[in-house]
Image (cartoon, coloured by chain):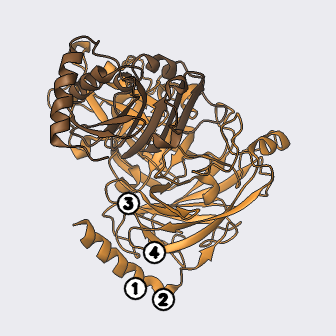
Amino acid sequence: MRRLIALVSVATVLGLAACGGGGSSDLSGGGGGGTTPPAGNNVATLTVDAGPDQNSVNTPFVSVTVCSPGSTTNCTTVDHIEVDTGSYGLRIIASALPSSFALPYETDSNNNTIVECTVFADGISWGPVETADIQIAGEAASSVPVQIIGSSSFTTPPADCSSRGMTEDSVETFGANGILGVGAFVQDDGFYYTCPSGTCAPIEPSLNEEVSNPVAFFATDNNGVVVVLPNVPAAGSTTLTGSLIFGIGTESNNALGSAMIYTLDPDTGNLSITFNNSTFSESFIDSGSNANYFVDSSIPTCTSGFFCPSSTLSLSATVTGINNASTAVSFDVANADDLFNGNTSGVAFNNLAAPESDTDSFDFGLPFFLGRSVYTAIADQSTPGGNGPYIAF
Amino acid sequence: MMSTRSRRWALGAALLLQALAVPAFAGLGGNAGSVEADQLKMKGTLRTTVAAAFTVHEITSPAGTVVREYLAPSGVVFAVAWHGRKMPDLQQTLGTYFNQLTAAPRPEHPNHAHFSVNEPNFVLQSSGHMRAYSGRAYDPSLLPQGVAVTDIQ
């Protein structure tokens, strides 16, 4: 089955070959990542700044409006929602919402509230699933399951949840007012529970009950997103503004153009990246990673956890999709201590990198997105470049 | 390197005896008996690989998450590693070291796809994203001679 999907995808890419693609690209290149922000109903402003905790670097944020389902008045807009192509679904920290604002709980057939344990690599977030109408830029999605993290009504995760990492249930510990998962899948495949009489037990919700990527719920422009960010100088930038464009090939401002398509593993969302003559088969391209993470024992690491080479390195890695589409990408690695000390207010760096612990993985994080338009197509959704899941740039 | 059915049977018998004497929560820093406890907790299948400097017990949960526990010749679990669609139960896998994970300081510039703890007796590195998590943890003071950190994966 997977081979069949791959063959179809290869055929799709071959069909697109006349449009260009292939060869190498560098940080100044890419399919139209420009200085002029695109306009349109499907364009939300991306802001890269220090975030609510004042500690963020290379983290893109967006504002999201949520309303009680069917209401145009019981609404609130939350800023500093992190835009993450490595997760799926909208999650908001309860304290970032007005205390007077409430959304209806999602319940199971026994009228018990469904509560989720979200797991990121750095911790767990506990909170109920609630139903919201979502507005971002000119796009609207109705009755989407979202997670409210750190709810005063569901304060203590069960041991089955808290045993999977440290708890991140506040703006300070989460590092944002929330997160908008706009990656290449719809459902988040998380851990779900109901807690009748205060005792939580795992449940298997139906797919439409899971917290889900809101983009797939839009009436139009619902097959994926384009993250567009300008490049920054080698010393970094203290401010950066870009665009989160909804839809791929649905409007004049989100055409694939010369972007090349790299299909993703339909189970994991991963693809392959070759670096230093080694192939890392579980690699990914992720706006939620604040650096490029890869294995290179020859580069010293400093106490901040990032790479600190004695002088800036110019490196290259080759991205290869499941469809075998392949492109070399050049990138720089600067000394992170020098970057942070030289630009103490810096929030965007295209040359920040860190060691990857997974010996099968190379993670092109936000530095990769600077100076590019990066398309993320949702699994099984149709686009002019074929069905998702894929990344294109 | 290949495990054999007979070796697994023999090991299973030995583990059963040891399991009677060890607490259910052990994982990192525990012994072979704790591997059995972890396997039972995960309702997983166990595969054992014997290398020169250490033995690897690999437990695969029904959900497909793989946890590897690295045993030194002395029998102590000096490292653990995991990968799969779901994050494993780290309290089970890390044993008493789990408290050092939950008490660890947040990094200066955090992100949700990577997290590490670097303490004299406990190193943890976690990475990945929804549908593909991986990580490893070890106690540097327990690493057997000749074992490199990159052997833990």
Real-space Cα separation, disc 1 to disc 4, in angstroms: 12 Å
Binning the other alpha carbons within 10 Å of mark 3 as few (below 14), some (14 to 19) or many (20 upward) gives: many
> Which residue type does callout 2 highlight?
Ala
Write down the residue under mark 1: A15
Q: Which chain is brown?
A: B
Q: Are marks 2 and 1 on the same chain?
A: yes
Write down the residue under mark 4: A325
Q: Position of residue A111 (x, y in %)?
A: 18, 26
> Which residue type does callout 1 highlight?
Gly
Pick the residue in front: A226 or A44.
Answer: A226
Q: Secondary structure beneath disc 1?
A: helix
Sequence-first disc among 4 and 2? 2
Real-space Cα separation, disc 4 to disc 2, in angstroms: 14 Å
Label 4 or label 2, whichever lies nearer to me, is 4
Q: Mark 2 touching mark 3, by CB under 8 A?
A: no
Real-space Cα separation, disc 2 to disc 3, in angstroms: 24 Å
Real-space Cα separation, disc 1 to disc 3, in angstroms: 20 Å
Sequence-first disc among 2 and 3? 2
Residue A378 bears which disc, if any? 3
Q: How many marks?
A: 4
The chain letter for the residue carrying disc 1 is A
Label 1 or label 3, whichever lies nearer to me, is 1
Q: Are marks 1 and 3 on the same chain?
A: yes
Q: Are marks 4 and 2 on the same chain?
A: yes
Q: Mark 2 touching mark 1, by CB under 8 A?
A: yes
- Is residue A307 depicted above or below A148 in this figure? below
Sequence-first disc among 3 and 4? 4
Write down the residue under mark 2: A18
- Give the quadrant of residue A372: bottom right
